[in-house]
């Protein structure tokens, strides 16, 4: 993989990752007249739950559903400059122009209204966009195994780099796909959030893993993986180093976890064989998902990685994909129980979900 760092007209970093070392030089200049990025992010901790909430009011003006010929993630064309100055690319990463978290935010840690009740701090971190291909019409599931391997290497590269930034506590690469999920740019892409705190979901999983280890002396994910192999009823795809299965307490009408057989804390710890095998297994999962309703499945897919500075021994890297689509033309809405009390009610059993995905393959 060839890696080239450049900068956009407003100073944001853009990094080209090419599949092969003999890729053309990435020397195109961003000719746009762009104002400097002015992020005003802050975080506040809910005094009732202890969870951090990000405030990023400047994102109201972000790009919203542009026509395909003005897509900001496509390569630059004559008379149509975009976020990517080159006329073509393999995989590209650049700083988000409308970030939820940024390095240049200012201010001191304090409390709301100075009352001492609600902690408040700058939203210091970083948000990046990852374009998986220059082809506007493709999807992740249509990529080649070699390109998926490049993307995985990119995620690992960015995890390592972002983990070293000031204030970053956890790195979360993810992909949102489909208007039903809330996607406003249809070019195949994902994002990476470098959070200034450990996320609530991760905190809960770490606490559960710690309690399980104290009682059983083993990691809970290792035992879950062994149980899935023993039962076999929820497995969707399997490789030498990875298994994809519907979690036994699935919340969503479509939900799959892709788990490495070896415990690693984050993407940087995967070896070459594990990275190659992930590409094969994950493409099987995505193609089954798109065949499920004979239409592109809207989904969120994200990597659960260890926090940067603590409890890495309690983490087990895995990817989770879920969809809000419960039938070809029906959505699962997060109504009172889910939204109000975080108590999920699924319209299908995990075994039924897995059987449908296997049959779709």
Image: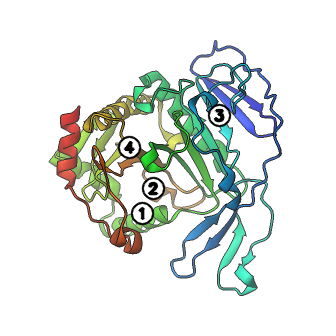
Measured Cα–Cα span from mark 1 to mark 2 = 8 Å
Q: Which mark is residue 218?
A: none
Q: Earlier in the sequence, mark 2 or mark 4?
A: 4
**Closer to the camera: disc 2 or disc 3?**
3
**Closer to the camera: disc 1 or disc 2?**
1
Residue 103 visible: yes
Left or right side of 282 for 120? right
Above or below residue 221? Residue 117 is below
Q: Which mark is residue 205?
A: 1
Q: Which residue does the image show at 69% across and 30% down from the upper left? A: 82
Q: Which residue does the image show at 33% across and 72% down from the upper left? A: 337
Q: Position of residue 189 (x, y in %)?
A: 54, 36
The residue beneath circle 2 is 315
Measured Cα–Cα span from mark 4 to mark 3 = 39 Å
Marks 2 and 4 close (CB-CB < 8 Å): no
Q: Which mark is residue 262?
A: 4
Marks 1 and 2 close (CB-CB < 8 Å): yes
Crowding near the residue tagged with mark 3, few <14, some 14–19, many ≥20 C-alpha atoms within 10 Å:
some
Marks 1 and 3 close (CB-CB < 8 Å): no
Q: Which residue does the image show at 19% across and 42% down from the upper left? A: 356
Measured Cα–Cα span from mark 1 to mark 3 = 37 Å
**Closer to the camera: disc 4 or disc 1?**
1
The residue beneath circle 3 is 72
Q: Earlier in the sequence, mark 1 or mark 3?
A: 3
Q: Which residue does the image show at 57% across and 77% down from the upper left? A: 46
Tell which of 321 and 276 is nearer to you: 321
Dot 1: what SS? helix
Measured Cα–Cα span from mark 4 to mark 1 = 18 Å
Which quadrant holds residue 145? top left
């Amino acid at each position: 993989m060839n890696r080239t760092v450049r900068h956009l007209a407003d100073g944001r970093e853009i990094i080209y990752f090419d599949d092969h070392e003999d890729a053309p030089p990435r020397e195109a200049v961003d000719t746009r007249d762009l104002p400097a990025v002015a992020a005003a992010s802050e975080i506040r901790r809910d005094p009732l739950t202890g969870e951090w909430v990000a405030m990023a009011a400047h994102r109201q003006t972000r790009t919203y559903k542009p026509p395909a010929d003005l897509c900001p993630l496509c390569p630059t064309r004559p008379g149509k400059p975009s976020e990517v100055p080159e006329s073509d690319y393999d995989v590209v990463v650049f700083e988000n122009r409308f970030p939820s978290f940024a390095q240049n935010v200012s201010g001191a840690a304090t409390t709301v209204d100075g009352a001492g009740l609600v902690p408040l701090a700058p939203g210091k971190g970083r948000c990046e966009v990852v374009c998986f291909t220059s082809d506007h019409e493709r999807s992740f599931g249509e990529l080649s195994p070699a390109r998926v391997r490049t993307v995985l290497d990119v995620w690992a590269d960015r995890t390592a780099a972002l983990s070293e930034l000031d204030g970053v506590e956890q790195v979360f690469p993810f992909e949102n796909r489909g208007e039903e999920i809330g996607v406003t740019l249809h070019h195949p892409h994902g994002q990476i959030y470098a959070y200034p705190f450990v996320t609530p979901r991760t905190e809960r999983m770490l606490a559960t893993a710690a309690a399980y280890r104290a009682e059983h002396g083993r990691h809970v994910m290792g035992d879950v993986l062994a149980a899935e192999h023993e039962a076999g009823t929820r497995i969707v795809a399997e490789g030498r180093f990875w298994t994809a299965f519907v979690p036994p307490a699935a919340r969503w009408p479509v939900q799959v976890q892709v788990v490495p057989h070896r415990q690693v804390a984050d993407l940087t710890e995967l070896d070459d064989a594990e990275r190659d095998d992930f590409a094969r297994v994950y493409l099987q999962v995505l193609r089954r998902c798109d065949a499920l309703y004979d239409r592109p499945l809207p989904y969120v897919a994200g990597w659960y990685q260890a926090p940067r500075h603590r409890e890495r021994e309690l983490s087990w890297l895995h990817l989770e994909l879920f969809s809000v689509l419960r039938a070809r033309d029906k959505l699962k809405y997060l109504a009172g129980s889910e939204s109000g009390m975080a108590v999920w009610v699924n319209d299908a059993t995990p075994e039924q979900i897995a059987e449908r995905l296997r049959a779709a393959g």
